[in-house]
Image: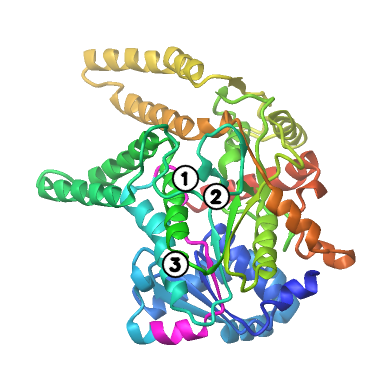
Amino acid sequence: MDAVEVAGCFRDKTILVTGSTGFLGKLLVEKILRVQPDVKKLYLLVRAPDAASAEQRILSQVLGKDLFNTLREKHGLAGFQKLIKEKIVPLAGDVGTRDFGLNSSRLEDLCEEIDIIIHGAATTSFYERYDVSLATNALGAQYGCEFAKKCPNLKMLLHVSTAFVAGTQEGLLPEKALKMGQALRLGYHLDIEAELQLVEKVKTGLTAAKSGGSDQSEKTIMKELGLKRACHFGWPNVYTFTKAMGEMLLEQQRGDLPVVIIRPTMVTSTYQDPFPGWIEGARTIDALIVAYDEQAFPCFVGDLKDTMDAVPADMVVNATLVAGAVHWNEKGQVIYHVSSALRNPLTGHVFEDACWDYFSIHPRVLENGKALQNRRPYLFKKFSYFRAYLTLMYKLPLEMLHAVSLLFCGLFSQYYQKHNRRYKFLMLLVKLYAPYAFFKGCFDDTNLTRMRKEVKMNGNDGSLFNFDVKSMDWHQYLLNVHVPAVLKYGRKKKGSV
């Protein structure tokens, strides 16, 4: 199978995409339209109250992005608008409800049309409300599976997950399905139904006691509950915890559906397709880039000798579409780790050196016209050491200031509250990301390697669906593509606030 055959699989096919407003979702939509303009229809399911609102979301949050500039240039503005009108169909719905919230008549007609489902909808925040994460990441996978079973012509269900459903396990982590109820913490059993009941019980209690409370307090309580339950069962955050639940539910209910699960590691900006450096939001490994840019944190956590398993977003998209084509209409489930650590490891040393080199070449200039001095942040190899340092250097002085403020009738209260909030936020941020800074696992990519060898991508077609991380030079990519992409997005977002 070559690139032409992969693209040919999507010719005259009707595809349902969930999560099209997300980072990978946009890339998937753009890629399909670009490599296969003869796709029949792309139904894009988005959370919206009605069809008009759904259309507006798609226009503003997906098609209006500069990601689609290559398509606009290829077809011209009029041709691009014609293509969108013919191929894109916005759908108002919700992945967290059965039948995606579609009415029965619309559901029946849609199911008859669908050939492929790409289920990418997810809430990716490490500190999300537990009820929201359960609905989207766990039940969303179950409802996606139930929906797929109602599609008589379905040839493929592509489910986008994360390699970190493995939590913080060490050693070689296989491309295997998760067993229902198997927690990562030894001796514990995960009962998903009990977790759903727990959420409802807590929310009912909050509603009953709401006379003096607020929506903000409910939000905080639900976020803390998600983090607490994740850690209780052995996962570091609510995102990976609920994504693992979603995989368990899918494995339990898929039957003989043709299913492919894509598990990417840490996803970074595009390597080359449709152009280098497209990104939305700071990803997991970008905290060090932000720290360098702002020179705000003199220290962080991590070990430069460790490997950071990352993969560019366009390679994730390419692997997803190729896997869908390779396993077209095959009953059963196949799992792919889209990772880099085994074939082309990115070490902390390479990452940090690239940051240093970039900011040495492009120093940040202060308002007074002077260049901000480039300093390498000190990395603590243990979270406990980092916490002790911050307590000694920041928390204790803050509490001393608080005591003085109380003696002088709250003279420094605003300053104290502002910096105490920043301190708490930093501690939460590091607590959430520390498991990845010290990650000792290695994702097996046997299935992905086998697929890459079976699929022949030669000549000019070689880059069309490139997902070979060995083709990358990490230092050059970080220096010339990823670091400037992160800074461009971050500064653009700051300016829009």
Give x and y (percent) for residue 197. Answer: 24, 51
Q: Residue at x 66, y 56 (%)?
A: 316
Picture residue at 70% right of the left edge, 30% below the top: 352
**Considering depth in this image, is 488 or 333 the residue closer to the camera?**
333
Q: Which residue is mark 2?
A: 162
Residue that badge 1 annotates? 240
Mark 2 Cα within 10 Å, few/some/many (few <14, many 20+)?
A: many
* Of pointers 3 and 1, the one earlier in the residue sequence: 3
- Tell whether label 2 touches label 1 (CB within 8 Å): yes
Task: Report if residue 114 lies within the magenta region.
Answer: yes
The magenta segment: 107-127
* Total numbered labels: 3
Q: Which residue is depicted at the point 74% across and 52% down?
A: 449
Tag on residue 49?
none
Residue 38 location in percent, x, y?
68, 84
Taking the view exactly as shown, the residue that stands out farthest to the right is 459
**Amino acid type at mark 1:** Thr
Left or right of 322: which side holds 175?
left
* Local SS, label 3: helix
| Mark 3, residue position | 144
Sequence-first tag of 1 and 2: 2
- The amino acid type of the residue labelled 2 equals Thr
* 210 shown above or below 373: below
Is the Cβ of the residue at disc 2 closer than 8 Å to that at disc 3?
no
Q: Of the residues under marks 2 and 3, which one precedes in the sequence?
A: 3
Crowding around mark 1 (Cα neighbors within 10 Å: few <14, some 14 to 19, many 20+) is many
Observer able to see residue 34: yes
Q: Is residue 125 magenta?
A: yes
